[in-house]
Amino acid sequence: MPLIIDSLEDALIQITGQPKRQYSKQERDEARGNLALMNDRVFMVTFADNKNNHIITEIVNALRKIHGLAPIPPIERTTVQNVSLLDVLGRGMVGDLLSEGALINISVEVQKGSQDDYAVRGTLTSSNAMRVQFNAGDDFTEAPDVIGINILGFRLPELEHRKEFVSRIVRAEYESRKTFLADKYSDYYIELPKMDNWTKEKLPEEYHDLWDLCHIFKAKTKEHEEVIRMQTITNPTALELSNEVRRIVAPDDFVDETLIRKDELEQLRNYMIRQKQKGKEEGKAEGKAEGKAEGQEKMLIMAIQSNAPNELIETLRKGAEITEARLAELRKMATVQ
């Protein structure tokens, strides 16, 4: 029976407040086997509370090894974003991680499902990491180096021309293509589906550590043993990560929470679909009035931006029956646009 609710806030309260169902052993075992490090809760628990910082360090070093770059110092602190139910629905987010070491910040985004304009999000995440532990007025020589890592379960349109499953993005001067602060700022995009076009034997040896680690991210827990054997995974950190993931998903409580989250997410999706359909139906009746009001406000904003006389602005305001308080809001909007 569908939930009867009037707002998204009410939906979240009612969905998360419902009695939790009991799952059978078969349901738990099946769910446990299908979990992977790309799952939001598996990712979060694996790296939260400064756990496994050394694994993040080794992932970074595996990436840098490809380009002959020196290893980074050990990571000192890790923060993982606790993803909310609404985050998962609205942004498809799996996990956000920020690690800090000696004058270096590492941002990690793990994105399971395809997301429009993800390249922008990856760039913004990396840029935000530049500001952590660095404030306006500080000595710029103390600004941290930043490495952005994006592990994606889909292909990035901007990298369609690339056959390789990992791409390093750096700033460069346009005409000469000469790199600009490339030793300080780098973004890596790992497209897991592209790994299907390669075998370990066809890759240069410097890729092998990253290959091993990426297969642990990619594989479901029930596939780990076979993947380790078939892909001849020998990297010690990759083997440790596999053991850690399987240890994390072993408790029934963990699997139950994951299944509960899945059920809640499905209910929230259904609610959003119903609201969208309801909005379309109501929009047919109210669209004309709303469109007219929106057009009048846009006209006012244009008048403000054009420094129109106050008399004209006041005439427009009264004609559109816009309050003075709303006019003040429109003035603020005009300065931002």
Image (cartoon, rainbow, N blue to C red):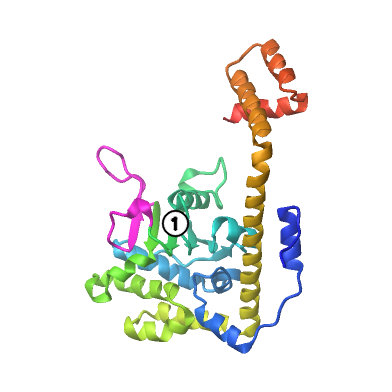
- Relative to 291, does residue 28 appear above or below in the rendering? below
Left or right of 302 on screen, residue 209: left
Asked if one can make out residue 84 in the rendered structure from this viewpoint, the answer is no
In the rendered image, the residue lying farthest to the bottom is 25
Q: Label 1, on which residue?
A: 148
- Side of 247 where 85 appears, left or right: right
- The relative height of residue 89 versus residue 21 in the rendered view (above or below) is above
State whether residue 140 is above or below residue 67: above
Q: Where does residue 78 sit, x and y in percent of width and height? A: 55, 65
Front position in the image: 141 or 144: 144
Q: Residue shown at 61%/84% (left/top)?
A: 251
Asked whether, in this view, residue 45 is left or right of residue 169, the answer is right
Q: Is residue 83 magenta?
A: no
Element under disc 1: strand
Q: Position of residue 312 (x, y in %)?
A: 67, 12
Residue 28 place in picture, x, y as percent: 60, 84
Q: Amino acid at mark 1?
A: Gly
Q: Residue at x 37, y 83 (%)?
A: 228
**Quadrant in the picture for the N terminus:** bottom right
Q: Main secondary structure of the magenta part?
A: loop
- Depth check, front residue: 263 or 118: 263
Position of 99 compared to 291: left or right?
left
- What residue sits 48% from the left and 81% below the top? 221
Residue 206 in view here: yes
Q: Who's the residue at 64% across and 58% down the image?
A: 86
**Residue 120 placed where, x, y %?**
46, 48
Quadrant for the C terminus, please: top right
Residue range corresponding to the magenta coloring: 156-184
Count of picture labels? 1
